[in-house]
Amino acid sequence: MKLSTILTFTAIGASALTAMTAAQAADLEGLKSQGFARIAIANEPPWTQVTSDGKVSGAGPDVALAVLKKLGVGDIVASISEYGAMIPGLQAQRFDMVAAGLFIKPERCEAVAFSQPDLCDAESFMVKEGNPMGLKSFADIASSGAKVGVVGGGTEEKLAIEAGVSRANVIVVPDPQSGSKMLQDGRIDVYALPVLSISDLLKKAGEGSGLEMFAPFEGTPIFCAGVAFRKEDSALRDAYDVVLVEMKASGEFAAIVEPYGYSADAAIQQTRENLCGGPN
């Protein structure tokens, strides 16, 4: 499934978006009447992707649109956001949900209501061929003084800081594609992203890029993402979950995510409660 939805301010006027009230945003009937839901995405294939002509695709938006259509909401309008700005933007009602591969973590569960898991992946490093610095963990990066590239506000930034990497050596890259070039140019020594994201970047870089992946690196588990909703929109989240669970059982979910390289079984076997460490 490929989406044809165009980004927010080219799809509809900004005034139409700001006119959408909190009551409409929290109410499924309001979204159905509006005809679309506003979602936050990144631009990190295969999780989410924005093509040169502004069209949105990727596993996260594809799943979200399939669920929403079954709920009677015919379309999505997507806004690109840094990961660190997604939850604040959701809480500020700039969009109705986050469908960007936002990993379900206990601290995030305090701030938002997650759907059941949809996309699972492990963490990895992109390094120069041969991994010349022998980097196999964030602890290695910290002890070596290497510079690590991360997406702003993402899980990798947090993991690096927690492992003791100096803030000066944690380099926020403007977008995933820029990290590959920065690594090639020697401006960073390693680039941290999920396995599927780096696999996509290496495929685009092609043979002879001088880059390779090290995965899974030490000390990190498999993570699973879900769609994030505002806490006060838990009824909308619950309705979304009913359809998502049905799609997992029917095989429709696997048909969407597996062509992108994700394991449907991994998402089916995990639960929101387990990832949140309790009810959400």
Image: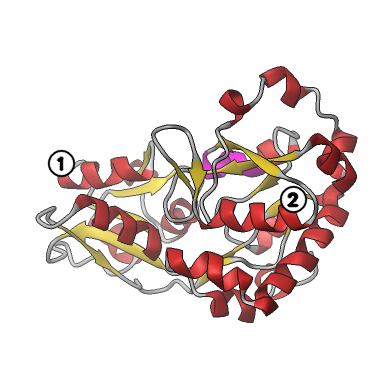
Check the picture and name the quadrant holding the C terminus. Answer: bottom right
Q: How many marks?
A: 2
- Badge 2 crowding class, 10 Å Cα cut-off, few under 14, some 14 to 19, many 20 or more, is many
Magenta highlight range: 82-87
| Magenta stretch: includes residue 271 | no
Is residue 32 shown above or below 54? below
Q: Is residue 260 above or below residue 3?
A: below
Residue type at mark 2: give it: Phe
Q: Measured along the vertical axis of the image, is residue 216 above or below residue 198?
A: below
Rendered location of residue 115, percent (x, y) = 72, 62
| Left or right: 253 as drawn, with respect to 243 | left
Q: Tell me the residue that label 2 is attached to.
A: 229
**Magenta span contains residue 84:** yes
Q: Nearer the viewer, mark 2 or mark 1?
A: 2
Q: Nearest the camera: 30 or 212?
A: 30
Residue 170 vs residue 13, the one in the foreground: 13
Q: Residue furthest left?
A: 208
Give the camera-side residue of 190 and 71.
71
Q: Which circle's residue, 2 or 1, is located before the other in the chain? A: 1
Circles 2 and 1 in contact, beta carbons < 8 Å: no
Three-letter residue code for mark 1: Asp
Q: Residue under circle 1?
A: 185
- In terms of image quadrants, where is residue 269? bottom right
Residue 96 is drawn in which quadrant?
Answer: top right
Q: Residue at image x 59%, y 74%?
A: 267
